[in-house]
């Protein structure tokens, strides 16, 4: 592994501004969820905000939002050119580029969150951890339960052990170590790490900013950092937006690291806007980020898996088509796929 290095430019927004020893979003567009809204949305999710009765039966879901079984041989033998991506569910994507296999925010459990107050999947993962090809690296955007799942981390460790390098924001390293992870790289915004993985040319992993927050309990709110990820290989590049509200930082990311062959951008869990807007983008803002980071291709994630908020479960997919057309994007430049579908972007 190469040593980590900080990429310093005067215009780069730093995360060091803290309040009572906790990280704080530096943008005026950020507003921390007030206490009552936080309780309603997180402690009693099914009572008001996320009405799971709107989710149809499994039989109907198999028609409207099928879970497809990936071609395991295709996953084990990705093309030598392009970025191959498979949506496993929610924010979990298997990304294969320049000779390495990367997982984003792996959550394979049936439910996620604190005991009794968690969220149950209405669409299961497209594959199991046992079916995955060999995983070289995992990137974690932040430590919320639907993005950092202890059970999934444990099973990945059982199968792949020291082979995996875990890339995490500052403050999450101890939790990862306590959960059994061994090769952990903690980064702050704009910091990069060279990943060799026995390759002739290293691949750069860079933690870039996002407008969000962290915490697995009320007492640890914002004690750890959050962010998006740039993966820059010798031939291909990938951007993972993680979990975020919209702000100008994405123009900066695009200026510094774009264009990208592929971006995975959240499109769901955005309504009601008065509560969700600072922390979750909607499909229109997802298109804005696609343009800001100069992505050649993007795939919508963070929808169709857990019922987290009030919008209709298919609305993110349908609204994205409308917003992409309004923005006059090239056809299929920003798409959604069903769970388990594998696509290659930017290949020869």
Image: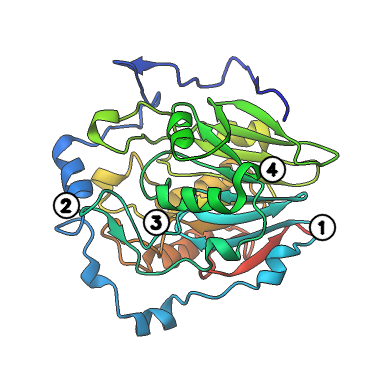
Q: Residue at x 62, y 17 (%)?
A: 9
Image quadrant containing the N terminus: top right
- Mark 2 residue element: loop
Question: Nearest the camera: 188 or 77?
Answer: 77
Coloring basis for residues: rainbow
Q: CA distance from mark 3 to mark 2?
A: 19 Å
Task: Tell me which numbered mark, 2 or 4, is placed earlier along the sequence.
Answer: 2
Reply above or below: 322 against 191. Answer: below
Mark in front: 2 vs 4: 2
Task: Tell me which numbered mark, 1 or 2, is placed earlier along the sequence.
Answer: 2
Mark in front: 4 vs 1: 1
**Left or right: 199 as drawn, with respect to 207:** right
Look at mark 2 in the image and give the residue it sits on: 44
Q: Where residue 154 appears, x then y in whole percent?
A: 47, 49
Residue 268, label in figure = 3
Within the image, what quadrant is residue 65 found in? Answer: bottom left
Q: CA distance from mark 4 to mark 3?
A: 24 Å
Task: Tell me which numbered mark, 3 or 2, is placed earlier along the sequence.
Answer: 2
Q: Residue furthest right?
A: 200
Look at mark 4 in the image and give the residue it sits on: 259
**Left or right: 37 as drawn, with respect to 30:** left
Q: CA distance from mark 4 to mark 1?
A: 20 Å
Q: CA distance from mark 2 to mark 4?
A: 41 Å
Question: Nearest the camera: 34 or 248?
Answer: 34
Categorize mark 1 by other alpha carbons within 10 Å: few (<14), some (14-19), many (20+): few
**Left or right: 332 as drawn, with respect to 90:** right
Task: Tell me which numbered mark, 3 or 1, is placed earlier along the sequence.
Answer: 1
Q: CA distance from mark 3 to mark 1?
A: 32 Å
* Residue 347 shows in this picture: yes
């Amino acid at each position: 592994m190469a040593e980590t290095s900080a990429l310093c430019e005067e215009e780069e927004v730093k995360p060091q501004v803290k309040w009572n020893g906790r990280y704080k979003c530096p943008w005026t567009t950020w507003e921390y969820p007030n206490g009552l809204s936080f309780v309603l949305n997180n402690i009693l999710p099914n009572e008001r905000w996320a009405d799971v009765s709107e989710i149809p039966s499994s039989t109907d879901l198999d028609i409207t939002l099928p879970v497809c079984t990936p071609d395991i041989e295709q996953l084990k033998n990705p093309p030598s050119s392009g970025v191959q991506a498979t949506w496993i569910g929610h924010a979990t994507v298997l990304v294969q580029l320049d000779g390495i296999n990367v997982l984003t925010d792996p959550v394979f459990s049936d439910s996620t969150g604190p005991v009794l107050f968690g969220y149950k999947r209405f669409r299961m993962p497209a594959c199991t951890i046992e079916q995955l090809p060999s995983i070289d690296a995992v990137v974690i955007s932040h430590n919320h339960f639907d993005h950092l799942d202890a059970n999934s981390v444990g099973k990945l460790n059982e199968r792949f052990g020291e082979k995996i390098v875990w890339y995490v924001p500052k403050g999450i390293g101890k939790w990862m170590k306590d959960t059994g992870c061994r090769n952990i790289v903690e980064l702050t915004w704009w910091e990069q790490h060279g990943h060799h993985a026995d390759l002739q040319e290293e691949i750069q992993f860079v933690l870039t900013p996002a407008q969000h927050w962290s915490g697995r309990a009320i007492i640890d709110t914002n004690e750890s950092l959050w962010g998006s990820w740039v993966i820059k290989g010798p031939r291909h590049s990938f951007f993972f937006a993680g979990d975020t509200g919209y702000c100008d930082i994405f123009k900066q990311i695009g200026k510094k690291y774009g264009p990208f062959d592929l971006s995975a951008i959240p499109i769901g869990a955005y309504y009601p806007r008065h509560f969700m807007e600072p922390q979750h983008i909607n499909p229109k803002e997802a298109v804005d980020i696609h343009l800001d980071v100069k992505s050649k291709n993007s795939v919508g994630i963070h929808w169709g898996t857990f019922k987290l908020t009030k919008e209709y479960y298919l609305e993110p997919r349908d609204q994205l088509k409308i917003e992409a057309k309004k923005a006059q994007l090239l056809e299929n430049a920003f798409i959604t796929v069903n769970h388990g579908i594998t696509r290659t972007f930017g290949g020869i």
